[in-house]
Image (cartoon, rainbow, N blue to C red):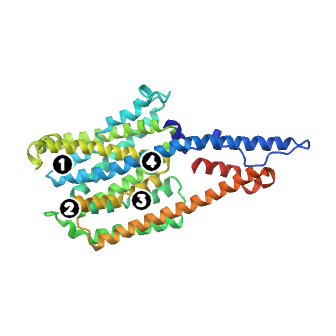
Amino acid sequence: MEASSQIHHHHPEMTPNLTSPPPRGRDGGGDDKNILAITTTTATTVEITKKKGGYILLLVLNYMFLFVGSVSSSLLSKFYFNHKGSSRWVSTWVQCAGFPLLVLPIFLPFYLLKTTQRKPFSDITPKLLMISILVGLLLGLNNLLFSWGNSYLPMSTSSLLLSSQLTFNLILSVIIVKQKITFSNLNCVVLLSLASVLLGLTSTHDKPNGLTREKYFIGYFCTVGAGLLFALYLPIMEIIYKKVYCYSMVMEMQLIMEASATVLATVGMALDGGFSEMMQESSLGFDLGQRFYWLTIIGNVVTWQLCFMGTAGMVFLTSGLTGAICMTALTGANVVGGVVVYGDKFDGGKAVSAVLCGWGFCSYVYGLYVKSRQGEKVQEDVNGVIKDGDYSNKHHDHQGLEMSEVVVTS
């Protein structure tokens, strides 16, 4: 797993210098150099192809973590509030308190499985440690906003509002990581923005019984704020992960961040009486009894860690924007879960919002598909040049550096 995750970064040693044709000597020595360059390129392609299978496996595994964690944690969080759980601090705390579970993917490969020679936390510098702590505090605030929003809003409404984080993420990615704006990007931003506005204007009748209009809008803006903070987190982590060379380091930083967020939630709970409130809820408040209360808490702890673990892995293996898109793709599953499990209403306004979200997402995916096909065509052309053996004459038409980038990222 560790080796495969390194494919994401274009190391100089993995990219042969083919930006200019090899010099051709009068004695024909240039042909030998051409053959050497072709051999180097072929060897690199074979090496990367071998690692590609492991990379794809790791990518699929992390998306499965994200899928299971996102849908399950949303359902369990709503389950907690639906059955007389009322502490937003408890809901915040369970989102990060499962960080000890990350010890398994960090320590098992080195101490038990013997699949790596790198000792855990050996490459975490003081700078990376401080950055991880600060980002963890940001995540802690994001968790609190999410808990407030989820306690007031129906799950389907909350899920659709959180899809607006893709809009924020695109804007922040342009500013922070210099993401290029394309038609598919812009189209996606416009459609998702319209979907969020439409949802906020048409879904106030869908609020739970006893919830005032003011509290409904508090939930609305807290959920949007949570989406904004998480959208900020993704491009920041994309920049940080450029200094990280293996998947194990990602999990180590994730453990530090979640521990930092847990400290913030624990301090808030201690100051606001959250722990005594938790004990009272478990024995008196939760209408399904003490056993189901603690099972709900444990389920939340585990599923939230799966969600954040999958998110971190997706950002490292791809990019912050792609990670945001993958999360947006789960909006439909969350909405269906809310309607099926909890009977949330799915009226016309919410249906139109869902369609706009899907339309925006599909337009972005189509843009990625077109770009991928163009890259594949370049690779096929270069492979044809190498196969024909006419390397020196056609090399200017197919930049070697571009070819090697396509091979690494395809």
- Amino acid under disc 2: Lys
The residue lying at 24 percent from left, 54 percent from top is: 148
Distance of label 3 from label 4 (alpha carbons): 21 Å
First in sequence: mark 1 vs mark 4:
4
Around disc 4, counting alpha carbons within 10 Å, would you say few (fewer than 14), some (14 to 19), or many (20 or more)?
A: some
First in sequence: mark 2 vs mark 1:
1
Q: Which mark is residue 60?
A: 4
Q: Which residue is mark 3?
A: 166
Q: Nearer the viewer, mark 1 or mark 4?
A: 4
- Amino acid under disc 4: Val
Percent position of residue 221, x then y? 29, 61
Distance of label 2 from label 1 (alpha carbons): 15 Å
Distance of label 4 from label 2 (alpha carbons): 39 Å
Q: Which residue is mark 2?
A: 215
Q: Depth check: give the residue in front, 273 or 199.
A: 199
The residue lying at 39 percent from left, 66 percent from top is: 357
Pointers 3 and 4 in contact (CB under 8 A)? no
Q: Secondary structure at mark 2?
A: helix
Around disc 1, counting alpha carbons within 10 Å, would you say few (fewer than 14), some (14 to 19), or many (20 or more)?
A: many
Q: Secondary structure at mark 4?
A: helix
Distance of label 2 from label 3 (alpha carbons): 25 Å
In this view of the protein, can residue 103 be seen by the observer? yes
Left or right: where does residue 59 sit relative to residue 146?
A: right
Q: Nearer the viewer, mark 4 or mark 2?
A: 4
Distance of label 1 from label 4 (alpha carbons): 35 Å
Percent position of residue 157, x then y? 28, 63
Q: Nearer the viewer, mark 3 or mark 4?
A: 4
First in sequence: mark 2 vs mark 3:
3
Pointers 2 and 1 in contact (CB under 8 A)? no
